[in-house]
Image: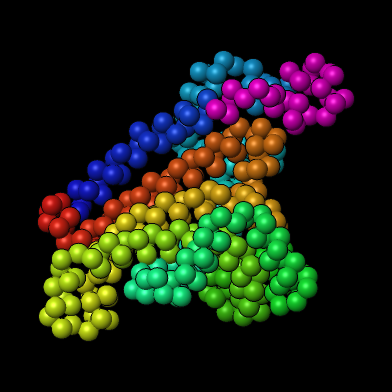
Amino acid sequence: MQRLIVRRLLLMVPLMVGMTLISFIVSHTLPADPVGANLGQRSMEDPAIVAAFRAQWGLDRPLPEQYLAYVRNLVQGNLGVSIRTHMPVTDDLGRYLPASAELAISATLVGTFLGIPFGVVSAVRRNHWVDHVVRGVSLLGVSSPVFWLGLIALYIFYFRLGWLPGPGRLDVGLPEPGHLTGMYTLDSLLTGNWAALGSSLRHLVLPGLVLASVYLGLVTRMTRSSMLEVLSADYVRTARGKGLRPRAVVFRHALGNALIPTITVLGLAFGDILAGTVLTETIFSWPGIGRYAYQSAVTLDFPAIMGVSLVIAAVFIAVNLATDLAYLFLDPRLRRATG
């Protein structure tokens, strides 16, 4: 297992280098000019201002020279300065990433702790009315657009019923909890700020459920199909023939093997959730990395775009490593093969 971890960590280096190259090429070859996206019309008419802007952000140099300069700064831990905010990209990411991580983790937990039981029940009660209901709910979650669900949720639970708060992370006028991790729920819990904890949890319900809808459907359908395949295996039939209780057959003999394909969905879906929070964060005014990436793309903020790309790539690589380790934990045959 140690060799696997070291080997995967070493593979991160060429993967991250390739990611920097791809993101640099894509962002710098767009048929648009960052000067026009960041300067006003009157400033664009002054050649001196345009030249000064290009020189300030290194846009007057050849692309290979710009890329090498970016890699040199990256090795030193410097992601550059945002053209739009005029702040270091590392500071911007440190401010916006915890909000997105809090939202993504909440959606992942909801999708996991609801999707796996739903899938198990649907497989065990195949073709029963429970199975049809679970399949219908999962299909609705997978096929419904996130922006539509978000708007409907806001209209029903905030505007019409008033059960849950509206957009934002905290109630208006409530101060932020002490900044320890940037996640309001965790910071409120660690500092004992119960008012902020209750407010942050209420504000997290709607965007968390909306973002978890697609994830919940995927986990449910994958768990169901895996359980159906495992329940028809010879060793499960043997366990039933020995007279084991149905609960023991399902949870002790079938579920562990059925979760192996589901783990793949869990890992990839978490990365997709973190990378695809743009619509959810926009609808619920959630100041996360999704909105930051969107605003950076609109203004052609190259350093910010590349910084977000690197963070998302690092998250995918880390999640894939965690997925491989989960395989080893669930399947003893893989542990013997790696050992």
Q: Position of residue 207 (x, y in %)?
A: 62, 63
> Which residue is pictured at 42% across the width and 47% down the height?
316
User: Where is residue 268 drawn, in percent x and y?
Assistant: 42, 51
Start and end of the magenta stretch? 26-51
Q: Is residue 147 above or below residue 175?
A: above
Q: Residue furthest right?
A: 42
Left or right side of 59 for 323: left
Q: Main secondary structure of the magenta part?
A: helix
| Residue at (52% x, 25% y) in the render | 25
Q: Is residue 148 left or right of residue 67?
A: right
In which image quadrant can residue 254 be found? bottom left
Residue drawn at 31 percent across, 65 percent down: 227
Q: Is residue 113 visible?
A: no
Asked whether residue 255 is drawn in magenta, I would say: no
| The quarter of the displayed image where residue 184 is located | bottom right
Give the quadrant of the N terminus.
bottom left
